[in-house]
Image (tube, rainbow, N blue to C red):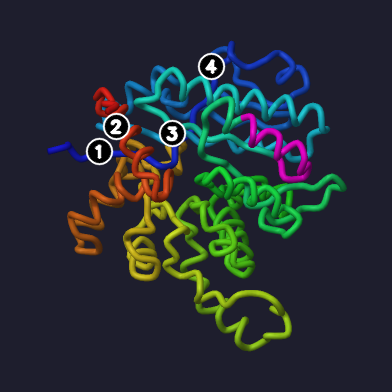
């Protein structure tokens, strides 16, 4: 009998300082200081709060916490918003090549995502082709919002981005939608971590709003889209969206009713909601089969070992099991099967191949 796996569907990884190209620091796009204490951009820095931001330390952390495999997303700081075209292309290519190398060198431990900038459609399509066909990657990371070529902020699911999703559908990709840059979009003072604690949830809710109104889960049946941080506001806000849709149909001409997306098999949410009441709402509304494990490690808003936060990796799911929000079968599925379903859909061979890599088993060919 195969042992139960623990797969983390939402993880991040920093390059070591010496791995980051010189131009990234010279142009103040992104770098890590030599002491590995801060990640930096022009006019911005953030402390490196845990050693597992880096590869070798991440592997040790995963071993200590019995995490068999992790999906490593791109760094939110490298969405490329506001950069000149050439700078953006080189920065994103570095991020994608870095992630590809991690996946290539540690296929048993990591499945890594790649990122494109939707403001430049042709370049985005070329990069998708390169990452899939040359680098063997199968998780497309997208921001909830992006800055277009004239400096306007747009939702990732605006119709002019349809070519991206047509190509993703062709390749049957898993998609991760993640918020960032709220402080650049919203004219409020950046205090008390408001853009991470409040506005990120609003960004996810806004992206889900347009994903479902545009019926993308049906228009592109081969992609599976996961909304980061549990798409928390998307769960709470459903009733208001339905009220608005039914009360002002003139504002939603050609759009699909919000109810049609609820529990859809191609829409996923991770567990990173920080309280069991929120997780309970997600499970009851969407179905446990649409929920995947997401730790958002090694960030302090992720599930990390912390006495002040009374936290550890997987705590929210342990509490959900203890409080009968989910049963043991659903618990195991959220840690393993649901993540595999998000990554590969109905491709059972791909699931077996990854599972065999994780378990260190030789794949037999008849």
Kindly report the distance in space between the C-alpha atoms of the residues bearing marks 2 and 4: 23 Å
Q: Which residue is mark 1?
A: 5
Q: Main secondary structure of the magenta part?
A: helix
Say what secondary structure mark 3 lies in: loop
- Which disc number belongs to residue 298? 3
Real-space Cα distance between discs 2 and 1? 6 Å
Where is the N terminus found, in terms of image quarters?
top left
Graded by Cα atoms within 10 Å as few (under 14), some (14 to 19) or many (20 or more), the crowding at tag 1 reads some
**Residue 89, picture quadrant:** top right
Q: Residue 263 falls in which quadrant of the image?
A: bottom left
Could you tell which of marks 4 and 3 lies nearer the N-terminus?
Answer: 4
Q: Is residue 121 magenta?
A: yes
Q: CA distance from mark 4 to mark 3?
A: 15 Å
Quickly name the residue at label 2.
Answer: 68
Q: Are marks 2 and 1 in contact (CB under 8 Å)?
A: yes
Residue mark closest to the camera, 2 vs 4: 2
Question: Is there a contact, CB below 8 Å, between mark 3 and mark 1?
Answer: no
Q: How many labels, in total?
A: 4
Q: Secondary structure at mark 2?
A: loop
**Mark 1 and mark 4 residues within 8 Å of each other at the beta carbon:** no
Who comes first in sequence, dot 2 or dot 1? Answer: 1
- SS at badge 4: loop
Residue 88 coordinates in the image, percent (x, y): 75, 31
Residue 188 horizontal side relative to residue 222, left or right? right
Task: List the residue tagged with mark 4.
Answer: 16
Whether residues under marks 4 and 3 lie with C-beta atoms below 8 angstroms apart, the answer is: no
């Amino acid at each position: 009998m195969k042992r139960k796996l623990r797969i983390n569907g939402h993880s991040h990884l920093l390059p070591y300082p010496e791995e980051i190209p010189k131009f990234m620091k010279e142009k103040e796009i992104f770098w890590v200081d030599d002491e590995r204490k801060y990640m930096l951009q022009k006019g911005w820095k953030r402390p490196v709060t845990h050693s597992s931001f880096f590869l070798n330390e991440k592997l040790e952390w995963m071993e200590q916490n019995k995490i068999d495999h992790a999906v490593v997303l791109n760094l939110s700081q490298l969405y490329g918003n506001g950069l000149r075209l050439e700078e953006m292309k080189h920065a994103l290519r570095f991020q994608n090549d870095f992630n590809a190398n991690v996946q290539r060198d540690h296929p048993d431990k990591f499945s890594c995502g790649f990122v494109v900038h939707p403001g430049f459609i042709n370049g985005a399509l070329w990069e998708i082709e390169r990452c899939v066909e040359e680098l063997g990657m199968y998780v497309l990371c997208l921001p909830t919002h992006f800055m277009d070529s004239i400096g306007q902020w747009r939702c990732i699911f605006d119709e002019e981005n349809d070519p991206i999703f047509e190509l993703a559908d062709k390749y049957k990709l898993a998609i991760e939608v993640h918020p960032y840059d709220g402080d650049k979009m919203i004219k409020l003072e950046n205090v008390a971590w408001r853009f991470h604690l409040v506005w990120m949830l609003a960004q996810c809710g806004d992206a889900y709003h347009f994903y479902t109104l545009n019926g993308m889960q049906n228009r592109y049946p081969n992609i599976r889209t996961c909304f980061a941080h549990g798409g928390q506001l998307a769960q709470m806000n459903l009733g208001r969206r339905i009220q608005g849709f039914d009360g002002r149909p003139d504002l939603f001409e050609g759009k699909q009713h919000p109810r049609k997306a609820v529990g859809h098999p191609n829409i996923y949410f991770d567990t990173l909601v920080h309280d069991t009441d929120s997780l309970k709402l997600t499970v009851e509304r969407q179905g446990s089969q649409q929920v995947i494990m997401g730790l958002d490690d090694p960030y302090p808003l992720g599930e990390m070992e912390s006495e002040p936060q009374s936290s550890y990796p997987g705590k929210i799911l342990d509490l959900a099991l203890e409080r009968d929000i989910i049963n043991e079968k659903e618990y195991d599925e959220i840690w393993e099967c649901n993540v595999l379903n998000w990554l590969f859909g109905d491709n059972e061979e791909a699931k077996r191949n990854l599972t065999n890599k994780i378990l260190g088993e030789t794949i037999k060919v008849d």
